[in-house]
Image: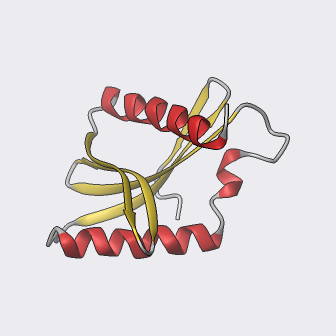
Amino acid sequence: MNNIEIGNKGEKIAKQYLKLRFYKILETNYRRKTGEIDIIAKKSGYIIFVEVKYRNNTNKGLPREAVTAFKQRQIKRTAEMYIMENKLNCDMRFDVIEILGKKIEHIKNAF
């Protein structure tokens, strides 16, 4: 599998995981010049911006370690675009869904 296929597989798993926990998926692969957000969801009055990281092993470290400070800034700027474009006034948070093999960890308020 190439990186795009791996990313798509991880995002599909993450969407299923969120749906089973009653998150409403608003957008996937939201792209702007500032960056991309894998999943934008809503639950309990929050808009949740989700970064998905999927790996089969830890040869390159834990998946969550790939969400660097630079990546976090990109996601935050892109989230601001989404909030402005949709004229939203609500609470928001930034989560990471880490998928390592078959294990899923949902890190709420990751940054």
Question: Looking at the image, which residue is at 66% across and 66% down?
Answer: 68
Q: Is residue 85 above or below residue 108?
A: below
Left or right of 38 on screen, residue 79: left
**Quadrant of residue 82 in the image?**
bottom left
Question: Looking at the image, which residue is at 37% across and 35% down?
Answer: 18
Residue 71, position as x, y percentages in the image? 58, 67
The foreground one among 20 and 13 is 13
Question: Looking at the image, which residue is at 53% across and 75% down?
Answer: 73
Q: Is residue 67 above or below residue 11?
A: below
**Quadrant of residue 55 in the image?**
top right
Left or right of 34 on screen, residue 28: left
Residue 48, position as x, y percentages in the image? 34, 55
Q: In the rendered image, which quarter contains the N terminus?
A: top right
Display coloring: secondary structure
The foreground one among 46 and 7 is 7
Left or right of 80 on screen, residue 38: right
In the displayed orientation, state which residue is furthest to the top.
Answer: 102
Residue 17, position as x, y percentages in the image? 42, 30
In the displayed orientation, state which residue is furthest to the right.
Answer: 59
Question: Looking at the image, which residue is at 67% across and 37% down?
Answer: 2
**Quadrant of residue 58 in the image?**
top right
Residue 75, position as x, y percentages in the image? 47, 67
User: How many labels sit on residues?
Assistant: 0
The foreground one among 23 and 13 is 13
